[in-house]
Image: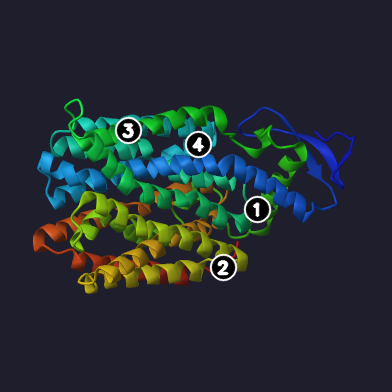
Amino acid sequence: MINKESTETEGVGLVPITMETEMTSKVVLPQICDVPYSDESIDSTYRKISWRLIPFIFLCYVMSFLDRINIGYAQLQMKHDLGLSDAAYGLGAGIFFVGYLMFEVPSNLLLQKIGARKTLFRIMFLWGITSVCTMFVTNHFQFFIVRFLLGIFEAGFFPGVILYLTYWYPGRRRSQILALFMTGIVVAGLIAGPVSVGIMEAFNDVYGLRGWQWLFVLEGLPSTLLGIVALVYLTDRPSDARWLSPTQRAIVAHEVENELRDVETGRTTKSTEVFRDFRVYFFALSLFAAVCGGYAITFWLPLMIKGFGVTEPTQIGLYSMIPYALTGVVMVLWSRHSDRVMERRWHFALAAFAAAAGFILIPLSKDSFPLAMGALSLASAASISALPVFWAMPTAYLSGKAAASGIAFINALATLGGVLSPWLIGTIKTMTGSQDNALYAIAAVLVLGGVTVLVSVRAREAAH
């Protein structure tokens, strides 16, 4: 219902309108008339949104990734205590993604229905508790079960945040924002080594518990607390954000709706269309390649560094910071450049090709520690830097309910790379005593992923 009274805010003609949203009953927002908002007011609005949302969800992602990858450091003690082979460890690390795959789409559809606050509370609280429960495993079977449950409970966090950010940011701002969010991977990687090894050494045999058991307790509990905070801190939709002025809420609505109109042609909008859209499967294949590369580094980084001749756990933890430090810098700069030139396809493909080169160089340079660390850092920086650039493409292509199901579906299929690469490395290493052939295979998958994006995604569709 349109009210005839009008107001002027920041020099912009506004007409208050009453609208209903999915998450609230009625919300009054100013509607834009003929006078556009200034660039300064738009930028100011998005700075305010970013300072409100990004630091918190960044911290949540740090804990998410830390609880996911700390197994790589725990296994330095855990493998011996439980009698795990490299193949069994690789399977346990990867089985996380089986549970993750099964529940991603339902979780994202639920987020669209009940909102981010309740969804992230459920996810973080349950995954934190499950991570803590890892301390109780005593054999292979229990290890596999708890990793599977961790995947189930963490399912939906990453695609849920991706979907959540599409409510707030138009496509032209999305790659940089996703890069800032995804630097949580980098920070988790930077602190995982020294913090995890430090906990295992400092708390080993305290109250009769091994260091790896304390690791899961002390790194799992913060996630449960952050879940509770999410319930009271986050805002489900821009229209619900009382910390924004009415004009700022209207700016967000204007920016997002303008983008929807600009790219509406050819968009997939219905959730049922997602599963019949061949391009969604091409997106998933491309992301699968980057995920293979990223998780090969994530789960095997400590043992790769150990294979370069470093034997002390403390030194392994410190050296593991080098690839992640480089990754953080490259990811932000690469995403910023992608947003500036409004190009996604080649930014993803070149990152995938560079990551492939890194994986090929790791076995060829392992006799030289500096060269091996350089190759490892290249593989890490390039494969992980491809991720925020990638997500700017499907979020521009999908909208409405298709975005909720499509983002989760793409991510779910791609996370099979998180099953494949850890298992492949562990199995080949157990069979041959070397992981070299597995790294070459991962390089080939990365090349395939880069080529797939170039062939299947139109340049115009990726320029948002």
User: Mark 2, residues whose alpha carbon is within 10 Å: few (<14), some, or many (≥20)?
Assistant: many
Q: Secondary structure at mark 1?
A: helix
Q: Nearer the viewer, mark 1 or mark 2?
A: 2
At horizontal 44% and vertical 55% (from top left) the residue drawn is 276
| Residue 234 visible to an observer of this rendering | yes
At horizontal 12% and vertical 45% (from top left) the residue drawn is 84
Q: Tell me the kind of residue under disc 3.
A: Leu
Give the quarter of the figure containing the C terminus.
bottom right
Q: Secondary structure at mark 4?
A: helix
Q: Secondary structure at mark 2?
A: loop
Disc 1 target residue: 260
Whether residues under marks 3 and 1 lie with C-beta atoms below 8 angstroms apart, the answer is no
The answer to which image quadrant residue 223 occupies is top left
Residue with the most extreme right position: 5
User: Mark 1, residues whose alpha carbon is within 10 Å: few (<14), some, or many (≥20)?
Assistant: some
At horizontal 57% and vertical 56% (from top left) the residue drawn is 267
- CA separation in Å, label 4 and label 3: 28 Å
Front in this rendered view, residue 259 or 344 = 344
The answer to which image quadrant residue 323 occupies is bottom left
Disc 3 target residue: 218
The percent coordinates of residue 311 (x first, y second) are 18, 55
Q: Tell me the kind of residue under disc 1.
A: Leu
Judge left or right: residue 428 versus residue 148. left
